[in-house]
Amino acid sequence: MCGIAGIVGRKDASCDTLARMCDALAHRGPDDADLCVWEEQGVALGHRRLSIIDLSPAGRNPMGNEDGTVWVVHNGEIYNYRELRTELESAGHRFRSTSDTEVIVHAYEEWGEDHVRRLRGMFAYAVYDRRAEGRGSASTPRLLLVRDRLGIKPLFYSWDGRRLLFASEPKAILAVPGFDRTPDRSALFDYLTCLYVPAPKTAWEGMRKLGPGQMLRFDGTGIECATYWDLRPATNGDVSEDEALALVRGRLRDAVGTHLVADVPVGLFLSGGVDSSTVGALMAGAAEGAVRAYSIGFDVAGHDERAFARLVAARYGMEHRERVVEVGAVREVLPRIAAMYDEPFADGSAVPTLRVSEVAREDVKVVLSGDGGDEVFGGYGRYRSFLRRDQVGFLPPWARRAVFGSLAGLPGFRRHRFFEDVTVEPLRQYGRLLELFSPAEKRGSLGADFVEEFRDYDDDWYLRPHWREDLDPITRMQVVDVMTYLSDDILTKVDRASMSAGLEVRPPLLDHELVEAVFSLPASVRLLGGPKGLLKGVARDLIPKEVVERSKKGFSAPWNAWMGELDGWAPGYLRNGAAVQAGILAPDPLGHLRADKRGAQTWALLLLEEWCRTNL
């Protein structure tokens, strides 16, 4: 796990600029740093290293081939690198290290762009192909940027028609002297819809993020983005329950075993839910020695899951460490969270993720996690909520609007979002289930001119490309979540929080071979009658019954309780702040919030304010 950065553009590829970019990523790679600059060609590649595979100097990046014509900087891990190395050596390639990065170098030489389809892992990397220089051909890319299939590792870029910049985090691009920091106002509007800035946007007009399963080609004159992987679920099939359980059980064991590949000890994030507990159980069966497990608790009892984590840890003899996050941490951590994510990001579980990462980093450099279980195995309660709304889908849109719209005048009607939602199309219905702020709450919290600017805005633009009408409703929602929310929220949260502590997090439930196997099954088999039915079917033989059968809690912080104690601070922090002065927030942005979500909504507004103070 590392941080990468680069510059492509004549007269711009200087050591000083690249060093500034890499210094901004020092937290991602505290073990080492190296730069390669070809000033005559206008290319500079930089790397910050967290040493995990091949700890020797031979494993340093940037890494080149035998004759120095192909170079790679790499963030992430290639889990099947040993198998690929054997195949490449048979084809005549010579290796100078035992690093997984060097496999990318020779795989690109051997198979061109198709090499990425052979990689199994989490990765974001750049390939600089010097063989294209001086040929006068735009058909062979000089630079290739690649992001892994599920978007586990991040990659940002900026192309102004003259110079291409890329980096693992926005802060490295922002460190380039003269970079245009003009905010993308539509991205800030999206933020209060999604609580993150959805890809390909960033909070700045001149910067974009590469999406999951995408690559970017640069030929010296322009860029082109292409998708090399997309989630393609089965729409039919005849698979028995026993066959499905056997398939997933085998894939899970393989995925966990593969994710343990490292030259350093590997720990575990153990939340007490089915996902991480199942990963931990399989890890205990494959790892040498006792598993080191790390859990987080809260000072509010209803959110504290440590008791379930202890059951799993005790069953497998894990070395288990815990930490409690208290309300006092909120004010202290606000500027740190804002700095970690660079752009507005309001997933409240970033705070406990940061704290548990700090605990784990005291012992290990790598942990496994249960991330992805809800998206892959259908665990979200909103899927059932959507199906209840979708039960009126047999009515044509005009009939839904007529029937439910006529009820709008009844007392208290608009307090029930169910009835309001069924008057809109299915995609918008699902979009509302993802939102923390309802449309009315968003209008009330934002400045009047800002609301008017986006009066006819399509709030669902980022969901629409993945909303496939040929799929059953559950699978349709899962695909949308995997291709949007998972990458832009869940994985972004974990990457920045863990890497700020210099910790690598690996999610075996997002091994692409496992994901493809699960989605090759019909939805009726995947769910086996309920949320995460297939995963729970496997887990029953592995983890305590109390953990398998407990109701879903989710890894969330007690924001309502916390913000209740900070009610006197938050309004004052927002009133006449930078966001209000810029017209982005209303003078009283807290006045229209819902009682049941007021804490999380307040946190989202505080983070937007913090971003505005730094960037406007």
Image (cartoon, helix red, strand yellow):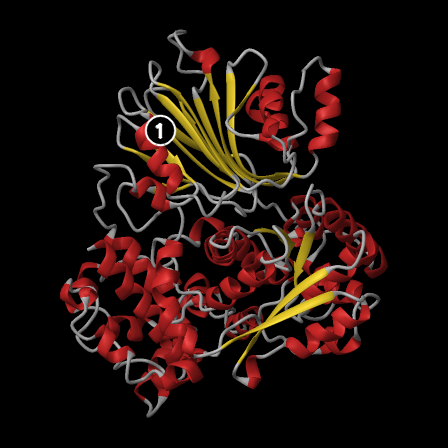
State the residue in front, 495 or 227: 495
The residue positioned 34% from the left and 59% from the top of the image is 344
Which residue does the image show at 46% across and 14% down from the upper left? Answer: 130
Point out the image quarter for the C terminus.
bottom left
Residue 510, visible in the rendered structure: yes
Q: Which residue is mark 1?
A: 7
User: Horizontal and vertical percent for residue 369?
Assistant: 63, 58
| 375 lies left or right of 532 | left
The residue closer to the viewer here, 575 or 327, is 327
Work out whether 515 lies above or below 412: above
Q: Residue at x 73, y 44 (%)?
A: 258
Which image quarter: residue 574?
bottom left
Q: Is residue 401 visible?
A: no
Q: Is residue 539 above or below residue 594?
A: above
Q: Which image quarter holds the N terminus?
A: top right
Please provide percent x and percent y for residue 137. Answer: 40, 11
SS at circle 1: strand
Of all residues, the one furthest to the top in this rendering is 135
Q: Residues within 10 Å of mark 1 (few under 14, many from 20)?
A: many
Asked if residue 113 lies left or right of residue 348, the reply is: right
Quarter assignment of residue 290: bottom right
Locate residue 362: give its quadrant: bottom right
Residue 559 point in image, percent of width and height: 43, 78
Callout 1 amino acid: Ile
Relative vertical location of residue 57 with respect to residue 38 in this rendering, above or below:
below
Q: Is residue 210 above or below residue 466?
A: above
In the image, 308 versus 242, the foreground residue is 308
